[in-house]
Image (cartoon, rainbow, N blue to C red):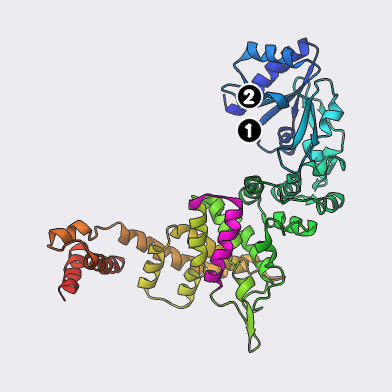
Amino acid sequence: MNLENKNIIMAQKIAAAVDEAGGKTYFVGGFVRDLLMGLENKDVDIEVHGITPQALFAILDTVGERLNIGASFGILGLRHYELDISMPRTEKAIGRGHRDFEICVDPFLGEEKAAVRRDFTMNALMQNVLTGEVLDFFGGREDMRAKVVRHVSDATYLEDPLRVLRAAQFAARFQFTVAEETTALSSGAALTALPGERVMGELEKALRKAEKPSVFFEELRKMGQLSDWFPEVEALIGVKQRPDFHPEGDVWNHTMQVLDEAAALRERSEHPLYLMLTALCHDFGKAIVSEEIDGVLHAHNHEVVGLPVAETFLRRLTKEKKLIEYVLGLTRCHMQPNWLVSGHAHTKSFMKMFYQTPYPEDLLLLSKADYLGRLGAGEAREEKAAAYAPVEKKLGEMLALYHERMSLPYVTGQDLIDAGLKPGNAMGDVLDYALKLRLAGVPKEEQLKQALAVYDK
C-alpha cells in the first residue's frame, strides 16, 4: 500500500466515525484541486465539521496516536500518517507579520463560511470523503477549466500577503493566468513584512515545478510586485542587448527564456533548484555594465560584476551557503563553455575550466539554456537546438575526457615527500605544476618526473 492510499484509507476511517457522531468530513485544499486536475498530490488534508473538538479528539485516539500539530488552530495529525486533520476556523489579521492572526476554531461554522478563508477558488473546493460530492461555492471548477487563478474574497485575500506570490506560483505551475481583479488587488499588497524563507518557498515551487517558471515573474510584473523581493530581476527590464546576438530583446526577455530552457533540463542536475536560481541570476551584471560604444552594445565583464548583486539577492532569501556558492561559481563562468567552442580553444582550456568548476555537468546545462534562451520572434526553437547540437557534442566529449583524466592516478603531497621534498610553499608550486600535467593527460610517473625536474631548477 503506498503512502497516499494509506492516508486516504485512514481519512475514510475517520470520516465514518465522524459520520456516526453526526458530523461530516471533507477533503480540502490542494488535494481536491489536484484530484480534479488529474495531478498527483501526496498531501492529504481533511476538514471535520459538525462535532466538537473533544469528540474529534476521542475519535482520533481510537484510530491511532494523535498529534497536536497546531491544536489551537484546529490542526491535528496521526503518528505514521501524512494526514492533516483540521476543523473549520476563521482567521483575522491583527498585524503585518505572517503569524499575526487571530484564530477562532468553530466546528459548526458551516461549509461555505469555512471555505471563504481559502486563498483561491480552486483551493476552496471541498469533497465529501464518504460520498465524493464536491462542494464548490466560488466557481473553482469553472476557473480551473478556464485556467484562471482567482481569489475567493476581497475582504480576506490580502490578510496574508504571501498569497500574491502564491497566485504567481500557481499560475506558473499550472500554466494559468491570474484573474484581472486578483492582479489589481495584489498590486496593493505590502510584501515587505514577509519572511525570506516564505518567499523562497513560493519561488522554489515555481522554479522546481513549473514548465515555464517565467510565468511567475511575468505575473508579478503585471502586479507591480517585483520591487520588494526581486529588484535585481526587475532591473533587467529594458536593458538592451545586441540584436544580432540576442534577437529575443532585452535582458529580461533573455532571462525569462533561459529560465524556461533550464526548466527543461533541471532533472538532469543533482541540484535542480540551484541550477534554476543560477539561470535567474546569471546576467544580473548586465544591468550595471551594459553600455553603447561606437554604436555597439556591450556588457563587458558582466559575469563578474554581477556576482555581488546575485549574492545580495540570494542572501535576502536564504542562508544556505552551498546554494550561494553554487550560483556564484556557475555565474562567474557561465559564458566560458560556449566561448571555448566558438573560439576553437585547445583541450587544456576545457580541462582548466572543468577543474575550476565544482559542478561541470551543470555548467554545461546552464550554457545550453543560455544559448537556447536567445529565441527571436518567429524563430523556430528546433532549428536553434539543432544549431547548438555540435557545440553540445563537443562539450560532452571534452567533459568525458576531463573525467577520464581525473580518474587516473596522480601526484600527491605524499609522493613528493617520499621523493625528498619538504612541506612548504615550494611543494604547493610543484603540486600545481603536476596538476597541469594531470589535466594534460600525462601519466603519474611522468607527472612526478617533470614536476621534480621543475623543482630542482
The numbered dot on residue 162 is none
* Membership of 2 in magenta stretch: no
The numbered dot on residue 7 is 2
Residue located farthest toward the bottom when viewing the structure as drawn:
294
Residue type at mark 1 is Lys
User: Looking at the magenta stretch, what is its main secondary structure?
Assistant: helix
Vertical placement of residue 351 versus 161, above or below = below
Q: Position of residue 192 (x, y in %)?
A: 72, 51
For disc 1, the marked residue is: 42
- Judging depth in this view, the residue of 6 and 104 nearest the camera is 104
Quadrant in the rendering for residue 399: bottom left
Element type at mark 2: helix
Q: Position of residue 21 (x, y in %)?
A: 77, 10
The span shown in magenta is: 302-321
Vertical placement of residue 77 versus 162, above or below = above
The quarter of the picture where the N terminus appears is top right
* Membership of 313 in magenta stretch: yes
Residue at (40% x, 66% y) in the render: 398
Q: Mark 1 packing: few (<14 Cα in 10 Å), some, or many (20+)?
A: some
Q: Is residue 281 left or right of residue 428?
A: right
Looking at the image, is mark 2 or mark 1 earlier in the sequence?
Answer: 2
Labels 2 & 1 near each other (Cβ < 8 A): yes
Q: Mark 2 packing: few (<14 Cα in 10 Å), some, or many (20+)?
A: many
Q: Is residue 457 left or right of residue 13?
A: left
- Judging depth in this view, the residue of 139 and 454 nearest the camera is 454
Q: Is residue 393 left or right of residue 266?
A: left
Residue at (52% x, 55% y) in the render: 324
Residue type at mark 2 is Asn
- Judging depth in this view, the residue of 126 and 87 nearest the camera is 87
Element type at mark 1: loop
Residue at (46% x, 73% y) in the render: 341
Vertical placement of residue 190 versus 352, above or below = above
